[in-house]
Each structure stands twice: as C-alpha cells, then as structure tokens.
Image (tube, rainbow, N blue to C red):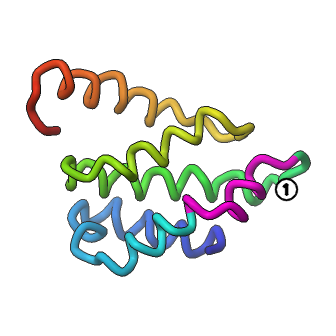
Amino acid sequence: MNQGDALLTRLLVKFNDNWLPEHPVVIGHLRRIWASKSFQDRLNKDGIPVHRWREPKLLVKCLLNYIKHRPDEVEPLFHLLRVFTLRHVPDFHFLRKFLDETVAKVIRCGSSY
C-alpha cells in the first residue's frame, strides 16, 4: 500500500461512512498491511521521508472507521494500540480520544459503541 492507496481509501470512507464495513476484502487488506512486520518496521526506522508520514495516519483512520462499525471485533483495536509503542511522527490524538471517550466508557457501561 502506498500513500495514494491510503488516501483514496480514506476519502471513500470520509464521504461514505459505511463504505469500508461493506467491503470486507478491502478491510482484510488494510488489517494485513497494518499488522505486517515489514510495515511496522518501516514506520519505526529513523529517517522516514516526510512524504510517508501521512500513510500510517490515514490507515489508522480507516481502521478506526471499521472498528466503530464493528464493535464486536476487538482484534483490530488491539493492533491499533501498537501506534503508541512505535516512533511515529504523525499525531494520533484522534485515536487516543476514541479510546478514552468511547472505548473506556463502553467497557465501564457494558454497552457497544
């Protein structure tokens, strides 16, 4: 996946909130890419070119959209937590906010988000 693919997928999701959950093949590819060792290694190495900084953020936003529609699937949520252990330049405040405001409340209340 390159930044163009991530941007196109993110645009589809942004303009049609239900698009990604309706396309399991695409979400399967996104999940495999995010979980792959090669992708994570590339994100964690020093000297990532500036033009590559946006790709992980776009990918996380797409996966987060899927998680919001499929709250019963917790595995992708755990994969996204990896973002806080690696050296990333992009700001992932939106993910932290979702975890704090949505997931934490759901766990306390026992309902779904």
Magenta region includes residue 68: no
SS category of the residue bearing label 1: loop
Classify 59 as above or below 92.
below
Q: Position of residue 93 (x, y in %)?
A: 50, 30
Residue in the foreground of this view, choosing between 97 and 41: 41
Q: Quadrant of residue 40?
A: bottom right
Q: Quadrant of residue 107?
A: top left
Residue in the foreground of this view, choosing between 62 and 37: 37
Q: Which residue is located at x 39 percent, y 77 percent?
A: 26
Q: Is residue 38 left or right of residue 45?
A: left
Q: Which residue is located at x 22 percent, y 74 percent?
A: 22
Q: Position of residue 57 (x, y in %)?
A: 56, 50
Q: Is residue 113 left or right of residue 52?
A: left
Classify 88 as above or below 72.
above
Q: Which residue is located at x 61 percent, y 74 percent?
A: 1
Q: Position of residue 42 (x, y in %)?
A: 77, 58
Q: Quadrant of residue 56?
A: bottom right
Check disc 1: other Cα within 10 Å, few if <14, some if 14-19, many if 20+. Answer: few
Amino acid at circle 1: Pro
Magenta region includes residue 39: yes
Classify 21 as above or below 88.
below
Query: How many badges with numbers are in the image?
Result: 1
Identity of the residue furthest to the right in this view: 47
Classify 71 as above or below 10.
above
The residue under label 1 is 49
Task: Please name the predominant secondary structure of the magenta segment in the image.
Answer: helix
In the image, which residues are magenta?
34-45
Q: Which residue is located at x 42 percent, y 66 percent?
A: 11
Q: Position of residue 37 (x, y in %)?
A: 68, 61
Residue in the foreground of this view, choosing between 41 and 56: 41
Q: Is residue 100 left or right of residue 72?
A: right
